[in-house]
Amino acid sequence: MAIRLGDTAPDFSAPTTQGDIDFHAWKEGSWAVLFSHPKDFTPVCTTELGYTAKLKAEFDKRNVKAIGLSVDSVDDHMAWLGDIEDTQGIAVNFPMIGDPDRNVADLYDMVHPNADDTLTVRSVFVIDDKNKVRLTLTYPASTGRNFDEILRVIDSLQLTDTKKVATPVNWNQGDDVIIVPALSNDEAAELFPDGWDEQRPYLRVVKQPG
Ligand code: BEZ
């Protein structure tokens, strides 16, 4: 069964490169980016894992923990780590789940048989601090993901969770945002006393709050 936005992220126990974890306990109080890659010792995956390691300070700022997965074993992951560090210039600083029995891959529907019946595709789940699934992405094996985009979505989610705004196309942190349509102009005036640019009654552009 596919996992949908708003679902509670399924809990699981699994071995990782940083020891055995219970997922919900491991991420307790944090957001998580749970992502799968097709296979160890492959080029695109090597670049993705290195880049994700480089984003650690950005993840930390947002209270996010990254965790990777493939259907390889923890021993295979461990053997690959040196190559990632050598070629990407950084050590992998987050756990990688070993899932040779596909327990977690099946739980999260990460194997798409019409793409490949044995390997995980490039799935991403952004899960919030209440264990709710907030973003799902599925990329093919041949296309490396844009992890800056994943950070951008987390920024949007964390902003729009607390302010009555939504973020427009190609928004980045600090750019103008949109007042949610559910807010009346009277209510908006309370929250945005400096006013807004009303391009249409439903399109009210305002400086990013907070
Ligand atoms: C890669 O990570 O380079 C890759 C993995 C599986 C299929 C194609 C590419």
Image: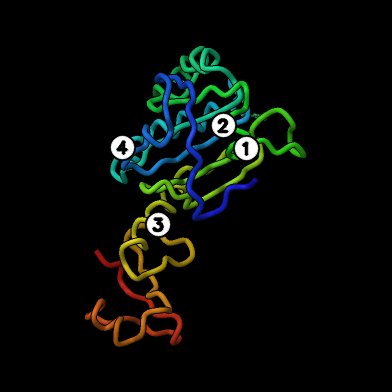
Q: Position of residue 14 (x, y in %)?
A: 49, 25
Query: Mark 4 or 2, which is nearer the eye?
Result: 2
How far, Cα to Cα, is label 4 from label 1?
27 Å
**Residue 104: assigned label:** 2
Q: Residues within 10 Å of mark 2 (few under 14, many from 20)?
A: many
Residue 209, quarter of picture = bottom left
Residue 32, quarter of picture = top left
Which of the two labelled residues, at mark 2 and mark 3, occupies the earlier sequence position?
2
- Please state the quadrant of the image where ligand 1 appears: top right
- Residue at the spot of label 3: 157
- Residue at the spot of label 1: 110
Query: Mark 3 or 1, which is nearer the eye?
Result: 1
Image quadrant holding the N terminus, namely top right
Q: Position of residue 37 (x, y in %)?
A: 58, 32
Image quadrant holding the C terminus, namely bottom left
What is the total number of numbered labels drawn onto the structure image? 4
Which of the two labelled residues, at mark 3 and mark 1, occupies the earlier sequence position?
1
Q: Residues within 10 Å of mark 1 (few under 14, many from 20)?
A: many
**Residue 57: assigned label:** 4
Considering only vertical position in the picture, is 76 above or below 166?
above
